[in-house]
């Protein structure tokens, strides 16, 4: 959410406080600044966590190859809101006919919201 | 039409050789989607059994030090399944969730008798219009009553370390079952019966003089050298001046609470754990540099007798993977995410073959049974 900026004094104080907590002063060697991250717009979900459709750099080079290798870890143990069906409550069997997603992805059920 | 003595001897020799090969090979137990544990025979190179889980997708797996029992936690409804290694049957299974309560937990440790399971849970209460998510708590689960019998609030200073990813910092019980240890940037020692904190060992301030570390963190258990009464793991430390990161092996004796650090070398940008041969003389890891499209991976082989890197070899790296080792320490495995295991020769670090499991495995890790 780096595109957010404080609009009032209280928010500015919070912003400064957070910045002061993460800052670091060290001798001999300065910490490396993190590489700039792309701005990934929100899609149809409330939150968009890069990882499946795009990687953290906004490209596809950092995704599993092929991307179907990662589909089950995306929907079960990570959380990709709205990117894959909700297997816990609404679509528990959407992947039951597909053991290896890379090979059998055609057997995944289509889920319509 | 009889068989000559030479032929008979030859056949007997082949039979003995085959038996010896089978005896030295073990089985890999891989948690798999959607809800099973695959038993894979290293010698045959194929799946020999599949144990269905009734409580959901496996998210953590651990074996007892005697290799007789495997404990699996599942994520769908937050369940526990106990597997008897000899019969390959689930002997106990249950879920913690109720219609109005969910308990998020990741892993835990059973007691020596297999009656209690110690874990860290986060309670989520369902109300008419909202959910309330509680703080992480120390939890005792009775495996026979199949329910939580005790939760204890966590001291404030331990909460933040346990609030991420459902409390992944590993727990261990002392051999006598009296003390519980949690490993992170410090070792927290508690009484097992009431979780009263007895001591905290600050790993950044080791007992040997003249050395102070900025940060030390224990990694996960190493299966093959995980002796009973000892927690063995990778650690990464850095000094407070130039923040030079060093990785190595650390052993924590659960009986006398002694920590033994064994630094090996500079910590690379990324390291896929470390696997140690059964004779504890060699170790292997995969290190990575760069990210995304520029990512490169290398096998590093170590001689643990003198803590030196003996061999390096580039290896095609998957975006996400786990390193494993065979029961005899002669093969290295790269698996996950996906449906296959790549096999490399540990002596040459060369690719040999790929085992197709035809089933996606979870990233719970694997258990190697000799």
Image (tube, coloured by chain):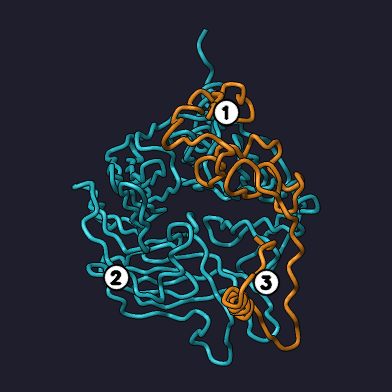
Chain colours: A orange, B cyan
Q: Nearer the viewer, mark 2 or mark 3?
A: 2
- From the viewer's perspective, is A71 left or right of B160? right
Residue at 37% across, 55% down:
B65
- Which of the 4 image quarters holds residue A103? top right
Residue corresponding to mark 1 = B358
Secondary element type, mark 1 = strand
The nearer-to-camera label among 3 and 1 is 1
Cα separation between marks 2 and 1? 42 Å
Question: Can the viewer see residue B207?
Answer: yes
Front-most of B244 and A52? A52
- The mark found on residue B265 in the picture is 3
User: Does B143 sit left or right of B75 as displayed?
Assistant: left
Give the x, y percent position of residue A109: 54, 23
Q: Earlier in the sequence, mark 2 or mark 3?
A: 2
Q: Which residue is mark 2?
A: B179
Q: Determine the chain carrying the residue at label 2.
A: B
- Return the x and y of residue A54 as percentages of the image width and height: 71, 45
Co-location on one chain, circles 2 and 1: yes
Q: Residues within 10 Å of mark 1 (few under 14, many from 20)?
A: some
Residue B85 falls in image quadrant: top left
Q: Are marks 2 and 1 in contact (CB under 8 Å)?
A: no
Query: CA gap, disc 2 to disc 3?
Result: 32 Å
Residue sticking out furthest to the front? A8
Q: Residues within 10 Å of mark 3 (few under 14, many from 20)?
A: some
């Amino acid at each position: 959410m780096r595109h957010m900026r404080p609009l009032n004094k209280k928010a500015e104080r919070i912003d400064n406080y957070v910045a002061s907590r993460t800052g670091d002063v060290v001798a001999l060697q300065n910490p490396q600044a993190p590489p700039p991250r792309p701005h990934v717009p929100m899609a149809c979900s409330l939150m968009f966590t890069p990882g499946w459709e795009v990687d953290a750099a906004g490209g596809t080079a950092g995704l599993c190859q092929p991307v179907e290798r990662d589909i089950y870890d995306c929907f079960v143990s990570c959380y990709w809101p709205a990117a894959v069906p909700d297997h816990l409550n609404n679509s528990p069997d959407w992947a039951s006919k597909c053991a290896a997603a890379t090979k059998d992805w055609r057997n995944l059920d289509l889920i319509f919201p | 039409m009889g068989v000559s003595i030479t032929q008979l001897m030859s056949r007997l020799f082949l039979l003995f050789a085959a038996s010896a090969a089978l005896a030295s090979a073990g089985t890999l137990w891989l948690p798999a989607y959607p809800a099973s544990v695959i038993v894979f025979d290293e010698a045959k190179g194929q799946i020999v059994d599949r144990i269905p889980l009734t409580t959901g997708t496996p998210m953590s797996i651990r074996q007892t030090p005697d290799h007789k029992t495997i404990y699996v936690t599942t994520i769908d409804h937050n369940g526990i399944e106990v597997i008897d290694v000899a019969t390959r049957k689930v002997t106990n299974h249950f879920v913690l969730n109720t219609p109005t309560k969910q308990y998020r937990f990741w892993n835990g440790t059973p007691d020596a008798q297999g009656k209690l399971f110690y874990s860290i849970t986060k309670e989520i209460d369902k109300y008419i219009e909202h959910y309330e998510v509680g703080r992480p708590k120390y939890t005792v689960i009775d495996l026979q009553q199949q329910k939580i019998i005790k939760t204890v609030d966590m001291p404030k200073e331990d909460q933040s370390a346990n609030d991420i990813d459902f409390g992944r910092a590993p727990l261990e019980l002392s051999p006598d079952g009296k003390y519980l240890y949690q490993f992170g940037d410090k070792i927290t020692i508690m009484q097992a019966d009431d979780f009263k904190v007895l001591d905290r060992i600050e790993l950044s301030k080791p007992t040997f003089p003249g050395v102070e570390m900025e940060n030390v963190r224990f990694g996960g258990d190493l299966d093959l050298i995980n002796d009973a009464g000892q927690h063995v793991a990778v650690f990464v430390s850095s000094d407070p001046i130039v923040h030079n990161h060093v990785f190595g092996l650390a052993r924590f004796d659960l009986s006398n609470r002694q920590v033994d650090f064994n630094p090996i070398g500079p910590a690379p940008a990324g390291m896929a754990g470390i696997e140690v041969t059964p004779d504890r003389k060699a170790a292997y890891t995969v290190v990575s540099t760069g990210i995304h499209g520029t990512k490169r991976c290398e096998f590093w082989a170590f001689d643990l007798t003198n803590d030196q890197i003996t061999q390096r070899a580039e290896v095609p790296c998957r975006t996400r993977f786990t390193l494993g080792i065979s029961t005899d320490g002669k093969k290295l495995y790269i698996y996950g995410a996906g449906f296959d295991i790549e096999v490399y020769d540990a002596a040459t670090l060369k690719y040999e073959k790929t085992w197709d499991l035809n089933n996606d495995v979870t990233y719970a890790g694997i258990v190697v049974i000799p």
